[in-house]
Amino acid sequence: MSMSVIARPEHCTMSRVVALSAVCLVVLAFALDDLEVALSGAAYANKTLILTVLNKAYAEEDGLLDLFVESLRRGEGTAQLIDHVLFVAMDAPAFQRCRSFSGVRCYRLRPVDGQGDDLSSEQLYMSDGFIRMMWRRIRFLGDVLKHGYSFIFTDLDVMWLRNPFPKLHRRADEDFLISCDKFNRRPRDYAGNELNTGFFFVASNNRTVALFDEWHGARNASAGMKEQDVLNQMVRRGAFQRLGVGARVLDTARFSGFCQDSRDAAQVATVHANCCLTQRAKVADLRAVLGAATERLNGTATDLRWPAHSECAKSWT
Ligand SMILES: *[C@@H]1O[C@H](CO)[C@@H](O)[C@H](O)[C@H]1NC(C)=O
Ligand SMILES: *[C@@H]1O[C@H](CO)[C@@H](O)[C@H](O)[C@H]1NC(C)=O
Ligand SMILES: *[C@@H]1O[C@H](CO)[C@@H](O)[C@H](O)[C@H]1NC(C)=O
Ligand SMILES: *[C@@H]1O[C@H](CO)[C@@H](O)[C@H](O)[C@H]1NC(C)=O
């Protein structure tokens, strides 16, 4: 009797240690790869998902995040996509706001070691903070490819009017489909079309992993250049051919933007507030686009005439 009384607490302690270690191991595994957990939660069975990045300024009430989610909810065949979008928050306030939406998947991206960057304020186009945020994003996207996931990357200032997946049909040898500011009707003319990193599809394979590694690796040698300029420069110097990346430039008829409006209302899937400086201007002009598109999709307008992007035009002066 007395033996078992003594033995019982020991037994309890042992099992508690075992249980605690098991919990610790599980917690450790999640901490090591919380990215994998987030990616597999959002992806389709074919390991494809949609990624977008936000900071505090984008996440403010009535800002770009609200508008982006609204476009997904209102667009043609886009509401079903929300469950496959991973919203990547660059700071704590953006993460908090993201989590206040129901049915939205949020992931908190930590700063790289030793770079306690505060990127939460509005990062004005081409400011230091803007450029740092862009590079953090490229590194993150490279990590996603290394995890074996393919994705559409979309900036938050892109309105999703229709499901873009059916318009991204690609040949087996095409790894990288990317939007441009102005389309010259030659989808393989990488030098002649200014590539825009606000919207692209990338398939995960060794070629695209190498492309993103090289792209991110070029950041130091590219002081004052944003990642988009660096990609355009790499591409003009033949990076796609050298790395064997099959690439295609997307037509603005389907993947439209303020630099060049789609001429094809029946086809347009997304509208990007490119050629625009401030968030305030983007929100105003995108809201007008969304309003016009909603009328069109509801059949109350016979043809889609884009509203003038007047706030964006003024944002440069
Ligand atoms: C992955 O599957 C989804 C859902 O079936 C589909 O819409 C999408 O086009 C697929 N993506 C690729 C890259 O095949
Ligand atoms: C890259 O290539 C290696 C060996 O050829 C292969 O094991 C690996 O799965 C490939 N990775 C991707 C992302 O395709
Ligand atoms: C780029 O610069 C940072 C610090 O400014 C340094 O830690 C890093 O090793 C450099 N990377 C390359 C590829 O030169
Ligand atoms: C159509 O209009 C109604 C009412 O104005 C709106 O609630 C709905 O979201 C619209 N539908 C689409 C597909 O835009």
Image (spheres, helix red, strand yellow):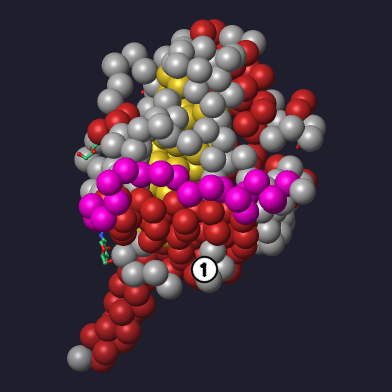
Q: Is residue 271 visible?
A: yes
Residue displayed at 48% across by 36% down: 261
Left or right position of 294 against 224:
left
Q: Main secondary structure of the magenta part?
A: loop
Residue displayed at 38% across by 47% down: 160
The answer to whether 117 is drawn above or below residue 139 in the figure is below
Left or right position of 225 against 264:
right
Residue 87 sits in which quadrant? Answer: bottom left
**Along the viewing direction, whichever of 32 and 78 lies nearer the viewer:** 78
Magenta region includes residue 301: yes
Residue displayed at 56% across by 68% down: 60
Q: Is mark 1 within 8 Å of ligand 4?
A: no
Circle 1 Cα neighbour tier, 10 Å, few/some/many (<14 / 14–19 / ≥20): few
Q: Is residue 48 visible?
A: no
Q: Can you give x and y, in whole percent of width and height, for residue 219 in the image?
A: 71, 31
Residue displayed at 69% across by 50% down: 314
Left or right position of 220 against 227:
right
**Along the viewing direction, whichever of 86 and 300 lies nearer the viewer:** 300
Q: Can you give x and y, in whole percent of width and height, for residue 238 in the image?
A: 59, 9
Q: Which residues are magenta?
A: 298-316
Q: Whereabouts is ligand 3, in terms of quadrant?
A: top right
Q: Secondary structure at mark 1?
A: loop
Q: Which residue is mark 1?
A: 62
Magenta region includes residue 174: no
Residue 7 sits in which quadrant? Answer: bottom left
Residue 82 sits in which quadrant? Answer: bottom left
Tell me the amino acid under the disc marked 1. Asp
